[in-house]
Structure formats: C-alpha cells, structure tokens
Amino acid sequence: MKKWQLRIAPWLSKYFSLPSDVMMELPRVTMIGQLHVYIENHQGLSVYSEKELKLKSNKGYIQITGSSFVLKMMLPEEILLEGNIEEIKFIPD
C-alpha cells in the first residue's frame, strides 16, 4: 500500500495543483533571516535545548543549531523558534 501512495501522490499533486508538501506529508521550513524559523508538518520534538532543536519528520529528522533558542509557539504540527540560527540540517532515517 505504501508503494502505491508513493507513486500516486506526485501525480495527484500535479494533476490537482496541490502543494507537494501537503500531499507527500513533507515538512515545510520557513526561515526569516537568522532570527526565526517556522516549521510545519513535523511529527514531534526529539531534542530541545538553548543551542539545538531536533524534530521528527516522516522521512528523518530536522536539526537546527545555534544559540539563545526560545520556543515562541508549539502546536501539534507547527513550531516557531526564535534565536541565533546557525544551521538547519535534514538527517534521513
């Protein structure tokens, strides 16, 4: 069943003009300068400290490093992080 979804999702996305991140459950990362990062479609918080944030996604992890981190907003599938962001890295499973 999973293989069928992987084949049909890109086609549905293109045919119905739907965003691929929504159809394929991919995370969306929006960064504003080096001060804010907004992440949608994550599956939970793995690590949080003043210097690191690590979120689970369906394809791996999203790791953000920097300093002076403050969680401004955290919802079930969205997060807003503020601080001095140095690096955003995707770590595949």
Image: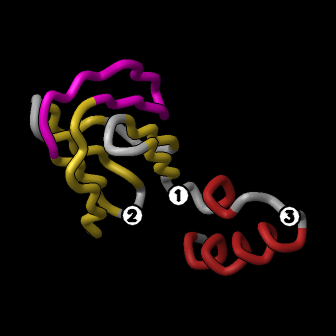
| SS at badge 1 | loop
Image coords of residue 83 (percent x, y): 25, 31
* Residue 81 to residue 70: above or below: below
* Residue type pointed to by label 2: Lys
Seen in the image, is 85 located left or right of residue 31?
left
- The magenta region covers 66-82
Give the residue at the far top of this rendering: 72
What's the residue at 20%, 51% (across, down)? 86
Q: Determine which quarter of the picture holds residue 45.
A: top left
Q: Secondary structure at mark 2?
A: loop
N-terminal of the pair, mark 2 or mark 1, is 1
Neighbourhood count class around disc 2 (C-alpha, 10 Å): few under 14, some 14–19, many 20 upward = few
Neighbourhood count class around disc 1 (C-alpha, 10 Å): few under 14, some 14–19, many 20 upward: some
Q: Which residue is mark 2?
A: 59
- Kindly identify which residue carries mark 1: 26
- Numbered label attached to residue 83: none
x 81%, y 69%: residue: 12
Rendered image: mark on residue 17? 3
